[in-house]
Image (tube, grey):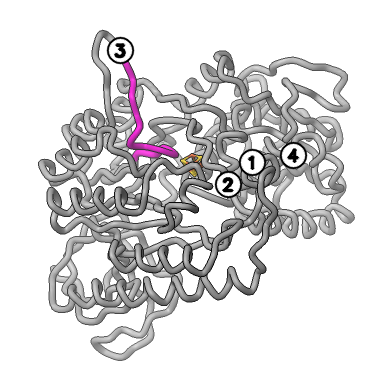
Amino acid sequence: MVSRPFQVKCSGRAGLIGVARPAILAPMVKHRVHIKSFGCQMNKLDTALVSASLREAGFGLTDSVKEADAVVINTCSVREHAEARILSHLGHLKHLKQHRPGLVVAIIGCMAQRLGQTLLEHDAVNIVCGPTQIPQIAELIAESLAHSAKQLAVTAEIRHDAEPARQALEAFELAHAVDGEQGPATPGQAFVRVMRGCNNFCTYCIVPYVRGPEVCRPPQAILDQVKQLADEGIKQVTLLGQTVNAYQYTSGGKTWSLADLLHRAAEVEGIEWIRFVTSYPSEAFYDDILQAMASSSKVCNYLHMPAQSGSDRILRAMNRHYTAEQYLELLARARAVVPDIAVAGDFIVGFPGETDEDFQATVELVRRARYRNCFIFKYSPRPGTTSDKRHADTIPDEVKQRRNVELLAAQEQISAELSEAYQGRTVKVLVEGLSKKAHVNPTDGANHPQLVGRTATDYIVVFNGPPALAGQFARVRITQTSPLTLFGERID
Ligand code: SF4
């Protein structure tokens, strides 16, 4: 990992560049920026903040790379596959730049932090900007555009005492979290970050190295943001943190937990659903959070709690601080307090040294946990992480693939059973918009555009209705089910 403090290459200057000053930066000719985002919800949120900051600085945004004067790629380093996709995308941009040398390409996000200046060696790349430096992105793009696609790199050492960067990030978040002009990417919904970084150092994970240590945001800033979003017409907020259930903030003699945030966010008029992701399997604050879910109809009965493996031996090697039985005990407690809770899990198959016996323990955990759905990934070593340093990537890819398919099949059977239970029921959904896939309507057999929405328990529901319903709630009677999707008819 490259972790040099604030560097500027080829510009002849070094030091922290301040937050963009829109009045000074506003280009004479309105330059257009195309933004492409890879990775998790944290990245989606950063992309929204960067979009808002670019607009404020006078740039136009465009969906078309061809029309763009600058391209920003928000990158992900969590898996090798994600980085490979980004490098392939850079290959296309390199080709484009042969005809348009003035096109500025900026890399932000985790890959920018992990690879730092070495990314500038790629022919397509002009700007490298780490996740804690995104408040500077508008200024960097303006500077590069003004100087014939000059190369600039700004990454900062990930340090526990990086207070100035922290303050700049918080100011950036407050300034751009609510972009009334552009509106939310998904109508009616918004993400609200409650914490940054992670302290857990699971041995396979790059996040603590590229996102830094856990820093919780002040509760009042979070709640003010929720209130502003409600004023803008947002109905659902998702509170985001790498280990969101570990949220803790002491202020005025009171220590705030995630449960406190959930209770207070539920009091905000206009907010109807509140979600939170991702939870670490831990005793800490667990019961309080379940009680918040049980006592407030606004807190969605949905828990995303990655287990990663069902083998205690592998969990120890991953530096996960629980056993499979303790994990299942947490789920049993959740179901005792919130009987209709839907649970989602994450798993890694093919961790170094994972035997068939270890893998079968994972299959057994999946069967017992009865997840609504699972996100299953094949292990890929991330440079600089403990598992990469300690273990060779010993499991052949065909074995990882076979385990992936087997685990998916086990989960699919459970998902199908849980979905079938919805047949004939009426559910409330928050409508996201037109479904990207063409669906045959089970009622009339016609293949026409359908709306897609989600229940509070995160079931995807496809149904008939006007596009104007996007961002609104609808009631849908379920007429057909599949493992991951429910189909139905809207009830007026
Ligand atoms: S809890 Fe583990 S897997 Fe999750 S972000 Fe932190 S280190 Fe990575």
Disc 1 secondary structure class: loop
What is the magenta range? 239-250
The residue at which mark 4 appears reads as 115
| Labels 2 and 4: the sequence-earlier one | 4
Q: Residue at x 46, y 58 (%)?
A: 347
Residue 343 spot, x, y in % from top left: 29, 57
The residue at which mark 1 appears reads as 385
Disc 3 secondary structure class: strand
Kindly check if marks 1 and 3 are in contact, taking CB atoms under 8 A apart as contact: no
Q: Residue at x 18, y 69 (%)?
A: 476
Q: Mark 3 Cα within 10 Å, few/some/many (few <14, many 20+)?
A: few
- Viewed as shown, does residue 166 lie left or right of 327? right
- Ligand 1 near label 2 (Cβ, under 8 Å)? yes
| Labels 1 and 3: the sequence-earlier one | 3
Kindly check if marks 2 and 1 are in contact, taking CB atoms under 8 A apart as contact: yes
Label 2 and label 4: CA atoms lie apart by 18 Å
| Labels 1 and 4: the sequence-earlier one | 4
The residue at which mark 3 appears reads as 251
